[in-house]
Amino acid sequence: MKTSKQSELPSYSAAVTHRQLSLLQKRQRSRGILLLVVASLCLLTLRLCGLCAAVEDAPARPSGAPLREKPTVPGPAPQKRLKGKGSHVRFLPHSQPFDAPIPGWNHAPEPLSADIAFLAVNYSDITARLQTLDTGRSLSIPQKHFSLNQPPPAIYNYNPDSALVMAKQDSKYFYECGADAKRDLRFVPRSECTIDNTVEKPEDYVAPAVVHDLDVVHEALTSLLRAWATFSEQHGITWWISHGELLGWYWNGRLMPWDADLDLQMSTYQLIQLVAFNQTLVEGRFLIDVNPSILYRTPQEMNTIDARIVDTKTGYLADITGLTHIKITATRNDEAAEEEAEERRSRLPFRAFSVSCKSPHDYDYNDIMPLQETFLDGIKVWRPKNAMHILEQEYGQKALLSEKYYVSHRRETFGWDRTEKVWVPISGEDVEDQQESV
């Protein structure tokens, strides 16, 4: 495994067709050469003009007089330019310090009342609680970062032919261990993994209960999240929490105690640029692994996960999915698929700028942007703007109100402790009408 950013990497691409990729590369090379020549000529001209003016204006120096040193002019140090392949490759300024005046930052917090008003309950307590988690800073990602036309990853060995061939192969890339598929099969001892998804199960198969050591899970996931937050901040990688992590943030700003993996999202542009960090081992423990099928942006049964960060010590993981602006259409040529596509479209506002992952989950761009900076288990993360509305769309209002959760893969019920503001396991409870866990 490689530990450096620029390593021998698999070949990937970000364009949709081979022709587009080839034209993009040629255009970038030509533009780069032209700009380099023009810049060199301008610099040479300026230097010659300055030299001539200095010679004409300089007073005659007496013979033997010492040369005067060039005075030091106070001022800010020159800024380091971001490097990237292609003239329009530009990382979001997410890697700069949090206290820097970055273009795109909004220091006015987004009001939470509009996002949570649909619950039809007294939401003042919920709003007050959530506002203590948010830092008040936000960041917008432009809509073009979700389009299908993106610059190639900033790696030297990019090959469009190989990238497109790999993207079209819908052979499963990630394999998981356990009936709940919460651990990466490669990093779990075989003695601990009696069930995996390398072989298709029969239709009448009933998975046994899965009992994770929740203390081990929590240590692994919080360590992973903290290491990834630091690494992504250093390298300008923008992402946000989703699904179960977003629900845990809503309840008490912590991970759900039964949740044994992390779910993160990012834009198509950022997903493509993540290829430059493929096979990087963060802090000697957490492996970044990018699925070769990331270029295929319509739903794929075997490759819904675009990338993964794996704790090589325990096998617990964070799944990353990219969101793309793509027309919502039927995935199969039958009536059921058409009805499913129509139902997906009906959940979004009319003429919304929709973005989707490959599962598929569909979102309104305006529900996500601008991202809000917040805390999850004491770690700075990003969340979607209208987090509660997204949760209601995905899980229903019951997930935001019910104080009992039945965790199906553990055959266990958790209850909400109103005093301590935490979820605790409870026994002897009837699971009927309880909210099933995420």
Image (cartoon, helix red, strand yellow):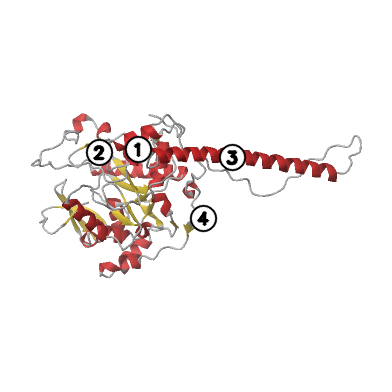
Which of the numbered marks, if any, corresponds to residue 290?
1
Q: Amino acid at mark 4?
A: Pro
Q: Amino acid at mark 1?
A: Val
Whole-angstrom CA distance, mark 4 to mark 1, is 29 Å
Residue 204 image-quadrant placement = top left
Query: Percent x, y for residue 234?
Result: 46, 43
Label 2 Cα crowd, 10 Å radius (few <14 / some 14-19 / many 20+)? many
Mark 3 and mark 2 lie on one chain; the one further toward the N terminus is: 3
Query: Residue 108, relative to residue 91: is it above or below?
Result: below
Q: Are marks 3 and 2 in contact (CB under 8 Å)?
A: no
Q: Where is mark 2, residue-wise? A: 183
Q: Is residue 156 left or right of residue 79?
A: left
Identify the element where label 2 is drawn: strand
Mark 4 and mark 1 lie on one chain; the one further toward the N terminus is: 4
Whole-angstrom CA distance, mark 1 to mark 3, is 34 Å
Q: Are marks 2 and 4 in contact (CB under 8 Å)?
A: no
Mark 2 and mark 4 lie on one chain; the one further toward the N terminus is: 4
Q: Where is mark 3, residue-wise? A: 34
Query: Percent x, y for residue 324?
Result: 35, 49
Mark 4 and mark 3 lie on one chain; the one further toward the N terminus is: 3
Which numbered mark, 3 or 2, is in the foreground of this view? Answer: 3
